[in-house]
Amino acid sequence: MSVAELQSPRLIAQDDEGESVSDRLMTQEEMFALPGGDVDRELIGGRLRERPMTKRNRWHASVEARMAFILGRWLETIPEPRGEILSGEGGFRIRRDPDTSVGIDVAYVSAEVIAATPARSPYLEGPPILAVEILSHSNTHGEMVEKIRAYLEAGVPLVWLVDPDFRTVTVHRPDAAPELFNVDRELAGGPHLPGFRTPVARIFGL
């Protein structure tokens, strides 16, 4: 495949928020070879997703920072090998052939996935144990449904969808219906985050 073909994937669809979808399967390496620009790029099942660069805001940033802090404090209580907490859209290739390559707002990744990833790789090779997505005003319903489904199908056992406006956390698991937690409830990690518990209100600084 030529460099020109890599740099100009033909786009066949665009959603209401301007996210574009390519008409052919790509690898993570091909996505990285695309020219830069003011766009966010991910691969879902090998299909390129492009949208205008997300405009962050202080509410999103503060929720992300608190979530990473709360998870980090929990991580210190469990024995080695602990794995790591990542924030700021940590890069993951959670599935291969076709590739699903995403940035995750906050994630807990196992020591095994870290060990299996080449030291200089910008992306971790494998799904995290926990993926936390914090809703922004630019996110569409369809985009989040697709991304959460991709996480679960790739083997992520626990996905938290955090809504800063309504101050809720929706918990998604592969084998259960979604469960909504508001600020009056406590969020627990179950067997995947042993011993983790926090009031939902704490995530939102209440």
Image (cartoon, rainbow, N blue to C red):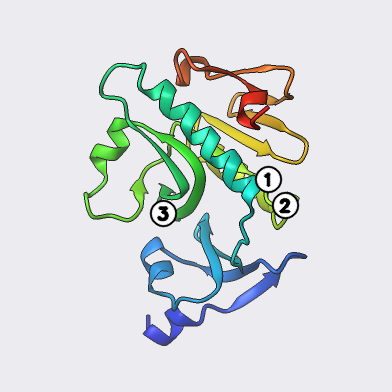
Disc 2/disc 1 C-alpha distance (Å): 5 Å
Q: In the rendered structure, which disc, 2 or 3, sits on the residue that comes first in sequence?
A: 3
Looking at this view, is 124 or 201 the one in front? 201
* Whether label 2 touches label 1, CB < 8 Å: yes
Q: Where is residue 84 in the image (x, y as percent from the top left)?
A: 35, 34
Q: Where is residue 150 in the image (x, y as percent from the top left)?
A: 56, 45
Q: Quadrant of residue 203?
A: top right
Judged left or right of residue 58, residue 8 is left
Using the image, tell me which numbered label, if any, was put on residue 97.
Answer: 3
Reading the image, the residue beneath label 2 is 142
Q: Is residue 95 visible?
A: no
> Of circles 3 and 1, which is in front?
1
Looking at this view, is 187 or 125 the one in front? 187
Task: Give the residue type that dot 1 points to.
Answer: Val
Check the image and report above or below for 183 versus 114. Answer: above
Using the image, tell me which numbered label, if any, was put on residue 145.
Answer: 1
